[in-house]
Amino acid sequence: MQFDHLNFNEDDGLMSIEDLKALRLQKKKFENDKKARKYILDINQRYRKMSARKSNSFLKNMNPFKKAV
């Protein structure tokens, strides 16, 4: 039996035990993937915020009229 991994609203009444196990594992994997993507997104947002702050302070401290040594 083929499962649509985005559509979990299928009728579970006529599925075999193996199909139910596969569906449950697929749902669990899908939820874990969503959590992992959210975690990575949070880390990337924090990193972008830190690097933007460093970049802004670098540009503010740079004096265009100062001669390079």
Image: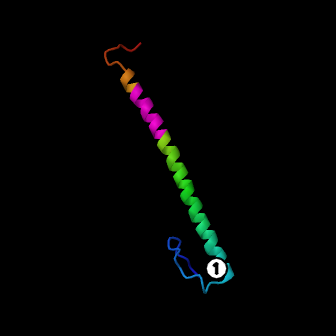
Measured as percent of width and height from the top left, residue 27 is found at 59, 68
**Side of 65 relative to 21 (left or right):** left
Q: Main secondary structure of the magenta part?
A: helix
Q: Amino acid at mark 1?
A: Asp
**Side of 24 relative to 43 (left or right):** right
Q: Measuring 53% from the left and 54% from the top, which residue is drawn there?
A: 37
Q: Image quadrant for the N terminus?
A: bottom right
Vertical relation: 32 (above or below) 7: above
Measured as percent of width and height from the top left, residue 31 is found at 57, 62
Residue furthest bottom as drawn = 14
* Residue 49 inside the magenta-drawn segment: yes
**Side of 66 relative to 22 (left or right):** left
The crowding category of the residue bearing disc 1, from other C-alpha atoms within 10 Å (few below 14, some 14 to 19, many at least 20), is: some
Q: Nearer the viewer, residue 7 or 62?
A: 7
Q: Nearer the viewer, residue 1 or 41?
A: 41
**Side of 27 relative to 69 (left or right):** right
Q: Measuring 34% from the left and 18% from the top, which residue is drawn there?
A: 63
Q: Which residue is mark 1?
A: 19
Label 1: which secondary element: helix
Q: Measuring 68% from the left and 81% from the top, which residue is drawn there?
A: 17
Q: Quadrant of residue 2?
A: bottom right
Give, as a single range, the part of the protein colored magenta.
Answer: 47-57
Residue furthest left as drawn = 65
Measured as percent of width and height from the top left, residue 24 is found at 63, 72
* Residue 48 inside the magenta-drawn segment: yes
